[in-house]
Amino acid sequence: MHSPTKRHALPKSNVPAVQPTPATTTDLTGFTPADSSLRGLVGGTPVLRVSQPFTSPDRGFWAKLEGFNPGGIKDRPGLHMVERARARGDLLPGAPIVESTSGTLGLGLALAGMVHGHPVTLVTDPGLEPSMTRLLTAYGATVDMVPAPHPTGGWQQARRDRVTELLARQPGAWCPDQYGNPDNVAAYTPLALELAAQLGHIDVLVCSVGTGGHSAGVSRVLRQLYPGMRLVGVDTVGSTIFGQPARTRLMRGLGSSIYPRNVAYEHFSEVHWIAPAESVWACRQLASSHYATGGWSVGAVALVAGWLARTLPRDTRIAAIFPDGPQRYLETVYNDEYCAEHGLLGVRPGPEPELIGRPDEKEVTRWTRCTEIADPLAPTVRTESIEGGRAR
């Protein structure tokens, strides 16, 4: 029969026992942590290495996750345009802000209005997700919905006409005019410097194009640091920006039915047009493989950046800007019922884009690439390819 284990007393320690000290009170009166203001929430977004399933494991690209801003990438120009207008005296204290938006800039302007004390009216159209309408309203903005598209300029022109009407009714009201405001471009200087600090060197920059602000602003700064850097634009089918005919567009956040003057055509090496189903496939692949994903622009940019990473030399450093996160797209991109209704499910993009020689060669309906870049409103044509990088 086994006897119970004998317990041995621990040897006495020569170290004196620690006596508890009385609790002390720290005076936090007036203490404010750094960057704890609303303004301090914007910027400093992370980068993420993206590879499979867009590339083999030994290749990939770097994604700048602008969805980590409170409202997405356009928090940057929303704040910057308002602050510059206030500094110039164009926007007086407490004066109304009125602007056209498909959603993301609306979040940035709502934030700017909250920070600086301005009422904000956002003119949009029925394509705006109901969740976005509710969110913008919760942030204190007034959402003004246009009832019908313009006969030739579509919803975008209808929204701009409504802005003009509202400005005439409200003396002292100010419109940022995101499509032609140079402050929209300048707002992205910090983003460019963040990318340079995070990646050290950049060979290729991939950007979606809508108002043209972030592609122009980021590329202008990075080309001063890396003169040989190439800029690849990503547009949507049905957009007029690079010379295609205007059509009804399902994808929001990129593309345009007008010609934004902030688009820096001379900076681009090539453009890719992406169809909605192709973007949905890429968005969902990102979600299931990298957790970080986003909306239409993110899927389109990821598809193009992945192809570049597969086809360019292995040591090419590619940066891709992901403008937002997935939250506002739960009713569209990530909704099986919505996607099935619009024929967006079960469509896997081809391994490479179709290539056309000129933007007006034919109307594109799927992933298509063109290395001839021209401002549709200018008489001259400039071409430059990603492989050669020479204008001719």
Image (cartoon, rainbow, N blue to C red):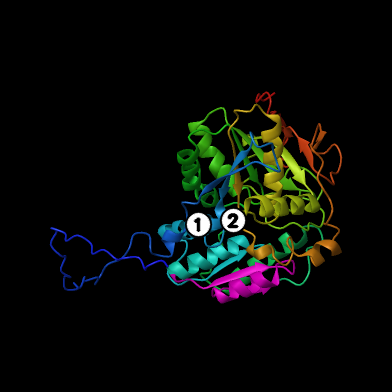
As shown in the figure, which amino acid type bears the numbered disc 1? Answer: Met
As shown in the figure, which amino acid type bears the numbered disc 2? Answer: Gln
| Res 125 label | none
Residue at 80%, 43% in the rendered image? 367
Residue 79 seen: yes
Where is the N terminus found, in terms of image quarters? Answer: bottom left
Quick one: 135 or 145, which is closer to the camera? 135
Residue at 67%, 29% in the rendered image? 312
Residue 168 seen: no
What stretch of residues is rendered in magenta? 117-145
Residue at 50%, 38% in the rendered image? 199
Q: Position of 256 compared to 82: left or right? A: right
Q: Secondary structure at mark 2?
A: loop
Where is the C terminus found, in terms of image quarters? Answer: top right
Mark nearer the N terminus (2 vs 1): 1
| Res 178 label | 2
Q: Which residue is mark 1?
A: 81
- Answer few, some or many: residues within 10 Å of disc 1's Cα (few below 14, many 20 plus, some between 14 and 19): many
